[in-house]
Amino acid sequence: MSNQKSDSGQMQDFRSLPGHLIRRLHQASVALFAEECASLDLTPVQYAILFAIGESPKIDATRLSEQVFFDRSTLGAVLDRLEKKALVVRSASATDRRVKVLTLTAKGKQLVKRASPAVLRVQERLMEPLTAGEREQMQQLLSRLAEVHRGRETGPKLDD
Amino acid sequence: MSNQKSDSGQMQDFRSLPGHLIRRLHQASVALFAEECASLDLTPVQYAILFAIGESPKIDATRLSEQVFFDRSTLGAVLDRLEKKALVVRSASATDRRVKVLTLTAKGKQLVKRASPAVLRVQERLMEPLTAGEREQMQQLLSRLAEVHRGRETGPKLDD
DNA sequence: CACATATATTCAGTACACGTACTATTTGTC
DNA sequence: GACAAATAGTACGTGTACTGAATATATGTG
C-alpha cells in the first residue's frame, strides 16, 4: 500500500483542466495564424496592433495597450519591430512631449487589408470542428469570460 | 468619400475573433495561476511538467513534451529552471546514452501536492462566471477543439 | 562493420508576456 | 512658481513558445 500517488485525495489530472485546454487551444490558434500568414511575416499580436492603429490613428501606446490588451512593456517591443518593418511610424505628440503617437504607413495599411482574409481563415479553421450552433455557444462563452476577466490580462489597469 | 476604412468589405474587428478571445482568456488564466501560486513560485507550465513527471517517473524529455504539449526546446529551458530549484533531477539513461531521464525530488513531489488545491482554485475562479451547465459545455467544447487540433501545438509531431 | 537515417538533446535566434524600476514630463496644489 | 503625485515611455530580468541548426548517439541495411 501507499504506492505512489492516489493518497492525496484531489490529484486532478491537469490535462482536463480548463487552463490547460485553453493554453493548448491558444497554441493551436497561433500556429494556424502563422501558417495562414506565413507569406506576410505577421503574428496575431502584430495584426491586432496594426488593426487597432488603423482604427484610431494617432493613438498613443498606453491607450493602444488597453485596446489590444497587452502590457505596455510588451507593446514597446512589438512596436519596435513594426517600426523596423516600416509598417508603423512613431512621432512625437504636439501637445504632450511624453507621448509618442502612432500611425500606419501606407505599407502598414496595405498589409492589414491583405492579411484580413487570412485572419478570417484562421478563425474558420480553428472552429471548424464545431457545428454552427456550438461555434455560436463557444463565441458567446469566450466573450463573457474574457469580459468578466477583463483587466486581469495585463495587470490591475481597469477603466473604460 | 473613400474616408478611411470600410471599403474592403470584410474588415472584421479582431476583438470578437475566437483567436483573440482565447489569447485574452489564456492571459487571464495565467494571471490567476500566478496569483494563487504566488507563494509557491510556480507557473502553470512548471506545474504541468512536475505533475507529468510524478505520473511517469524516469520519463525522458521528448516523451514528456508530448504529454504536456510543449515544444522540446521550450521544455529544456523549463527543466533547467526546475532543476535549479531542486524539484527535478535529470540523470543519464542506462540503456540509451542520448536520453536524460527525469525524476521528481522529494521537494518536487511535495510541491505538486501542495500546489494542487491552488491549481483547482484557479480553474474555479476562471470558470466562475459561468453556470454549471455552461461550464460543462465549455469544458466539452475546449476538449474537443484541443483534441482535434492536437499536434498543431508543437509542430507536426503526431502519434501516440 | 561502414554508412545512411533516425532520434535525443542542446543552442541560437525571434517573438510574446509580465513585473519592476527609471527617466522625462505633465498636472494638481499650495 | 516650487513641488509632490500621476503618467508616458523605456529598460531590465524572467519565463514561455517555436524554428532551425548542431552534436551525440542509436539503429537499420547491405
Image (cartoon, coloured by chain):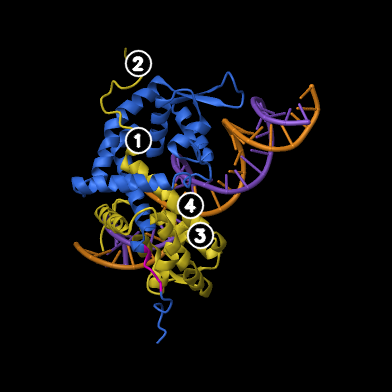
Chain colours: A blue, B yellow, C purple, D orange
The disc label shown at residue B56, or none: none
State the residue at coordinates (40%, 87%). Answer: A1
Amino acid at pointer 3: Glu
Mark 3 and mark 4 in contact? Answer it, CB < 8 Å.
no
* Labels 1 and 2 share a subunit: yes
Q: Which residue is mark 4?
A: B31
The disc label shown at residue B36, or none: 3
Q: Residue furthest top?
A: B1
Name the secondary structure under disc 4. Answer: helix
Q: Which residues are magenta?
A: A10-14
Q: Position of residue B125 (x, y in %)?
A: 43, 57
Name the secondary structure under disc 1. Answer: helix
Q: Which residue is mark 2?
A: B3
Q: Which residue is mark 1?
A: B14
Q: Earlier in the sequence, mark 3 or mark 4?
A: 4
Q: Quadrant of residue A54?
A: top left
Q: Position of residue D5 (x, y in %)?
A: 69, 37
Amino acid at pointer 1: Phe
Alpha-carbon neighbours of circle 3 within 10 Å: few (<14), some, or many (≥20)?
some
Alpha-carbon neighbours of circle 1 within 10 Å: few (<14), some, or many (≥20)?
many
* Labels 3 and 4 share a subunit: yes
